[in-house]
Each structure stands twice: as structure tokens, then as C-alpha cells.
Image: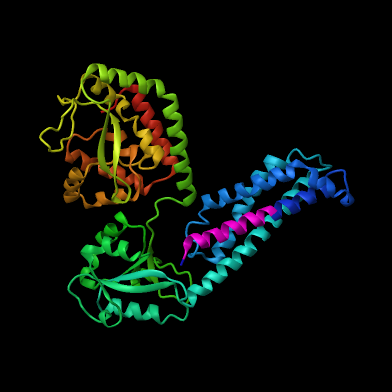
Amino acid sequence: MNKNAQSIKYIVSDVISSIFAWSLFFVFRKISIDVGEFKDINLVFVDTNLYKGLVFIPLFWVFLYFCQGTYTDPYRKSRLKELSQTFFISIFGVIILFFAFLLDDQIQSYKNYYFSFFILFITHFSLTYIPRLVITTIAARKIHKKIIGFPTIIIGNNPTALKLYNDIENQEISSGNKIIGYVNYGNTQNGLSEFLPSMGDYKDIDRIIQNNKVEEIIIALDTQYEDDLHSIITDIETNNNVLIKISAQTKDILLGRVKISSIFQTPLVLVSNEVLDNWQKVIKRLMDIVFSILAMIILAPVYLITAIIIKCTSKGPIFYSQERIGYRGKAFNMHKFRSMYVNAEKDGLPMLSSDSDSRITPFGKFMRKVRLDEIPQFYNVLIGTMSLVGPRPERQYFIDQIVKRAPEYMLLRKVKPGITSWGQVKFGYAENVDEMVERLKYDLLYIENLSVATDIKILLYTFIIIAQGRGK
């Protein structure tokens, strides 16, 4: 199952469809609006706007579809959902093209505008959705016939897990789950070993997922372990990008928690680990790139002056790099202007700073107050290891201490760390583990309410704090 090849099919289809739609519409405009008649068809091919459109228009549509998330998971597509998505994105795109290219047409009445809009929409929508429907239908049939499937493991080896496995295997139409094994959890051993290989114990879940390229996990716990469900989901989501499903109980069905995409499939509760819609992910990343480039250009004199002052006021390097833990638990080097004396942690034991910390240089105290020491992190944002807004990244030493008191800290790994955050606006630099734990609740609230609008609000509050010199 080659996801990239499937995505390319959609991209090529969309490019060709947009080219045909724009070409047909361009001919329509020449015939119905311009002075020439159909016998003047050569006027179409000498118009440079046709060729400009054939370059720009496909790129425009592919970008819109990319923002929508059309190409991110090409094998998990619903034909009905794709119909509505294509319909609404076509309306949105045509409105943009209409105001960008069509309002300067010389027309006899406004009815021509409405008719042009309708023709462009119908042409583009039809030529886009029909090929997509064909591609999606072919893929869906291969999934239903088990020709292709998603590598799946079951967590649990108990009567519930065995029944679930049999239900999935005996489905009239396959849901796409290619169950490759099970993972032991607890002491229950019953049934699955006769049908599936054991992949190991739950403590090795991250290794099992990575080594076997697992895409979906179905959790089927015995009733005595149901209280562990939340911690299991947290553990899996923290470091892995997989779909998590839970065996649906009667109470889940009654409460409306079970979402199904086919009437033939086994009812399962889908646990979504996406904190942002795809279009917001794209906008957030574009904001990171544009803002960090602009900041590095505009602040170039500040970088230079700060570097000179640091060099003149204390011995040691200008910049300070330190390993932090970021998105999905991956380590990276975070860069800052050095605000402490050299060998501040000469004893080898990591230490947090405080307002009265003697390790901080006089100029370092000023830098921290106005967040000047943080501006080299725009480079981290540019290369993608950090974002403008996100929970502050910590060292593994302190993470280990925080997790002992607040295991939910691991949920922060679902997003990229940031230069500023809701917790940073509230607390600034944490002086001890207690403050880190206290700051955690704001970072968790941020993740639960994550949106581009929330990021913009936090950025505005950060600017206010910097301007007022209230940094801690």
C-alpha cells in the first residue's frame, strides 16, 4: 500500500481537471462575453491570459485541496464526505477566482456575472469530483476485498479481544484492518494466541508500533483494566501517529459515542488525536515560516547589538544551545542568547533559574525580562523543530520529575513546543517543578482550545508583556 502513489493520483487528477475546466470556461467567456463569435476561436489561443491561467489556476486549486487535507490520508476517504468537501471547496475557490479575474469583464448586465460564476463552478466541480470518485471507489473496493489494509494490532488478550477479532474478520465488507498481532496487557490470557502472534507486552508498545509500521490500534481491555484506558491512550498518542479505536460497549452506543462509516462494520469508538484541522495546520505553519523570516530580517540589528553586548560584558560564547524534548518526544537543540555565566551548571546537575539567580549576568537579567534571549529561537521555528506558540520545551531531567506528579504532561508532546505559550504568558520562566506543574494546566487548556485564533491572542499578549517589560 503506497500512500504517496495514491496521493499523486489525486493531485494529477486535480491538476488535469482544473486545466480542462479553466480552458472550457475561457472559451465560454470568449464566446459569450467578448466581441468575437465562435468563428474567432483563434482569439482564445493568442490570449496570454489563457496560458497564465493554465499555470496559476492548477497550483491554486492544489494548494486549496492541500489545506483542506485532501492528500493527507488518501486511503481513508468517504465518498459521501468527499462529495460535500469538493462541493464547498469548489464554491470557495470559484469565489476567489471570480473576484480575482472576472470582475473586470465588460458585461451587458449583472446576470452575466451570475451566469459566469455558475458555469465555472459547475464545470470545475464536475470535472474534479468525477475522477476523484473513480479513484476513491477503486481504492475502497480493494480495501473491502482485503487486497489492501492498514496494519493493526489489538491491545488485550481476553474474551472481549477474541470476540472483537472474530467480528472484524467475519465482516461482510472489510473495514481495512489488517490485524497482524496482539499485545499482552495485564494477566488475562484467553483465545487470541490461537489466531494471532503475540507482539510482546504493552511496556514495549512504542517499539512494537515503530518496528511493525502499525497504523491502527484497537484497545480491547478486560473489565478489571477499564480504569487504565485513559493512561493507555495518553501513552500511545504521546509518541505515535496512529488511529486508536476502542471496543464499543452498550453504554457508548446509547450515549452516541460510536461513529461508523459503514453499516457492515464492527462498531468501534474512534479516538481522534488530531488537535487541529488540516487547513489550520497549514496556516499555523505558514505563520511560523513568514513570521520567523520577517523577525530575523527586522531584528538583524538587534541580533548584532545583543551579540556585541554579550561578548563585551561576560566571557563565553554568544549563543547557548541546549537539548530539549519536542514534538512526539523527539530531542532537538534549542538556541538562545547566553544569559548566564559560563559553567553555570558545572556540578552537572540541571538547575532552574530564579529572579535572584547569581548565575545570570546583569545583561542577562534584562534580556530575560524583555524576552531578548529567546529571539534566536526564530531559527528553530523556521526549521520546524518549534512553533511560534506552543508549550515551552523542557529538558528530560525535569520532564521525569513532572511526570511523576502529573502524568498528563505527556499530552504536551502532541504539539510542537513554542517560543511563547499560554503558560509562559501567565508564569514566564518556571523557578521550580511546582511552578512547572502549575503552568501545565494552562498548556493543557491551550491544547484543548488550539486554533489559529488562540495563537494570535497569545502572540498579542506576549507583545504586550515585552513592551511593558513584565517578563519573569
Eyeballing the image, is 58 above or below 309? below
Q: Position of residue 171 (x, y in %)?
A: 43, 80
In the figure, residue 249 lies in which quadrant?
bottom left
Residue 85 visible in image: no
Main SS, magenta residues: helix
Kindly identify the residue that appears in the image at 47 percent across and 62 percent down: 3
Question: Is 16 part of what is drawn in magenta?
Answer: yes
Q: Position of residue 290 (x, y in %)?
A: 47, 35
Kindly identify the residue that appears in the image at 38 percent across and 46 percent down: 449
Eyeballing the image, is 40 above or below 472? below
Q: Nearer the viewer, residue 6 or 369?
A: 6
Residue 167 is left or right of residue 350, and the answer is: right
Q: Which residues are magenta?
A: 2-19
Q: Nearer the viewer, residue 57 or 283?
A: 57
Q: Nearer the viewer, residue 451 or 290?
A: 290
Residue 268 visible in image: yes
Question: Is 453 part of what is drawn in magenta?
Answer: no
